[in-house]
Amino acid sequence: MACSIQRVALHEHLPLKQPFSLHIYPSFYCNFKCGYCLHSLDAAALEKKGFQRQYMDFDLYRKAVYDVAAEGWRLKAMIFAGHGEPLLHKRIVDMVAYAKNAGITDRTEIVTNGSLLTHELSDGLIDAGLDRLRVSIQGVTAGAYRDMSGSTIDFEQLVDRLRYFYEHKVDTDVYIKIIDVALKEPGDQARFEEIFRPIADTAAIEYAIPFVPEIDLGKLSGNSKQGCDVHAAVCSMPFYMLVLYPNGDVLPCCSTEVPAVFGNAARQSLGEIWAGRSRTEFLLRQLDGAGTVPVCDRCSVPAFGLQEGDSLEGYQARLRRAYKAKMAGK
């Protein structure tokens, strides 16, 4: 396997001199409209959220990589994901290769629905040195895909293309997952495992969480494997990551609502944004409780998305002093 993913006790390392991870959102377009995703919302709902479909300009991305290198940062992960399909970006291979050649990250990762993964694109990503491919499966038949994603696909072709990637990869870790609400018929889980376990390093079932406030998932079908059903008082994500939107805006997390914009990478360096007053003030508000930020208060991540070692509960007072000193330049 190409990479190991190990968590640390976050509170022991804060304040961080640099982000652990930088999440690049290359595309706000998607070829699917999955029922649990914001792309299933109508145009009016998306407009109300301020969501605009766009692609990231490669020059903006190149500047972001330059900023990371100029700061001397070594990221644990650069993740191409976001509120859209990364493989729709025409230069996604170049993006991976550029980060790898710059030597700024331990891991490059793409989160994708996999439907656009042609043999040629697979060859390009493998040659570029992609470290991890995370594929979200939407069903175990073409009909299930149509019901879940609103798209008609050639299911056998999808499986063949994923098999091609797996059989031709060098060091890429292949993680294939399916959301539990896509397993609707008896035998679906067994069929998923039969099809995808032979062509993945890991094949997993993940659990639906209420990530998009406008979508009512009803009762969750299970507890998230990455968290628990108790809402954390402090969300840890803004303390260790940055998210870069296609328009250059830099955000604290991957929420589908915008809790804050720290700055814009087209006009500022990522180093300035990371150490800036806007971000520090936001972290201090988090330490007063996620409820002090309306978007964070209704976000599902503090309840279901936090992982082992992420909890900052009980350390707020010490961290508040540290970040106030940092803002004062001490």
Image: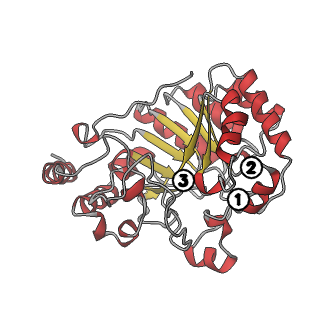
Q: Which disc, if any, is residue 88? A: 2
**Nearer the observer, 319 or 8:** 8
Q: Are marks 3 and 1 in contact (CB under 8 Å)?
A: no
Q: Are marks 2 and 1 in contact (CB under 8 Å)?
A: yes
One can see residue 124 in this view = yes
**Nearer the observer, 280 or 31:** 31
Q: Which disc, if any, is residue 266? A: 3
Q: Position of residue 309 (x, y in %)?
A: 30, 40
Q: Is residue 154 left or right of residue 81?
A: right
Name the residue rendered at 25%, 42% in the picture: 14
Q: Helix or strand or loop: what does disc 2 sit on?
A: helix
* Quadrant for the N terminus in the image: top right
Q: Nearer the viewer, mark 3 or mark 1?
A: 1
Occupied quadrant, residue 133: top right
The residue tagged 1 is 29
Q: Is residue 157 left or right of residue 328?
A: right
Q: Name the N-terminal-most of marks 2 and 1.
A: 1
Q: Name the N-terminal-most of marks 3 and 1.
A: 1
* Quadrant for the C terminus in the image: top left
Name the residue rendered at 58%, 36% in the picture: 109
Number of residues whose C-alpha sits closer than 10 Å to that of mark 2, classed few (under 14), some (14–19) or many (20 or more) = some
Q: Name the N-terminal-most of marks 3 and 2.
A: 2
